[in-house]
Amino acid sequence: LAALFPPPSSSSSRSPPWDPRTPDLALLFRLLPQCLLELVPEIAEDLLENVDQPLQVAKDKKNAKQYLLCDYNRDGDSYRSPWSNEYEPKMDDGVKPSEKLRKVEVEGNEVFQQYCGQYYDGGISSFYLWDQEDEDEGSFAGSLLFKKDCGKISKAGMEKGVWDAVHVVEAAPEGKDKAEYKLTSTVMLSATKKDLFKLEGNLTRQLDRSLPVKQGHIPNIGMIVEELEGSMRNSLQQVYFGWCEQVISSIRNTGTRLPEAVIEDLKNKTKI
């Protein structure tokens, strides 16, 4: 890796300290994460801190409802359920939102569960809030997560199709009747079609909005999330599927079948 991305010359006194992770992070933009980890497994823990991972699913035993795991509902080795507000494995001193903010969180989970069902035609959603102690009174932050696993789609011949979306929002009061929202959204897409292609990629975008809070924070958060996620979905469709379609359309069959040995060699070399 160092041969591809060599450290800067030591002669420059103004150059920042060389970070040995730089080649790995550079390759991360060109390889699937699991491919890079197979090449250099020793840097797995350090490297994964710098890249978003697909959302994992857990089940709330008390309410028999699924919820999503991420850093925003984790405390140590335990994860907080948005439905029961309890940690699993059990943790008595885990971080929880204030009583006032918890009411907003409960409302948001109910609303976004319906949104997920209508917008994604199913899937799983989770909404987490936490207080911003060092900010102005009334400020808070939250994370809205969506996961849609299409499974095996026989009509399209797809083996796998997964959409993971992580929306992190910060809200701060702006005057008496308004709030400023800062949204950072990351979408992770994975699609696999047997013996043809495997696509994995992610996209991150930001959006700032100042909106009246007469109807509450939940409608405002839902509106800006829908706006930004729709834009990101269109970008992913153009970049990933658009280019894939263009490449496939440019392939032509000369009418002569390649020898089986050549076909197998090509499959092995292009296998991800």
Image (tube, grey):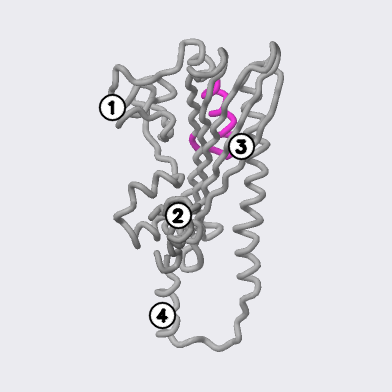
Q: Which residues are magenta?
A: 108-124
Q: How many marks?
A: 4
Counting residues from the start of the chain, the first of labels 2 and 1 encountered is: 2
Q: Find out whether the residues at labels 3 and 4 contact each other: C-beta distance under 8 Å.
A: no
Secondary element at image label 1: loop
Q: CA distance from mark 2 to mark 1?
A: 33 Å
Residue designated by label 2: 25
What residue is rendered at 42% in x and 54% in y?
18
| Cα gap from disc 3 to disc 4, whole angstroms | 43 Å
Label 2 vs label 1, nearer the camera = 2
For the N terminus, the quadrant is: bottom left
- Of callouts 3 and 2, the N-terminal one: 2
* Three-letter amino acid code at the position of disc 4: Asp
In the drawing, does residue 193 fall left or right of residue 181? left
Q: Quadrant of residue 57?
A: top left
Residue position marked by numbered label 3 in the rendering = 119
Q: Which mark is residue 265?
A: 4
Q: Amino acid at mark 2?
A: Leu
| Sequence-first tag of 3 and 4 | 3
Circle 3 — which element?
helix
Secondary structure under the numbered disc 2 in the rendered image: helix
State the mark number for residue 89.
Answer: 1
Q: Main secondary structure of the magenta part?
A: helix
Q: Judge the density around disc 4: few (<14), some (14-19), many (≥20) Cα neighbours within 10 Å.
A: few
Distance, label 4 to label 2, CA atoms, is: 30 Å
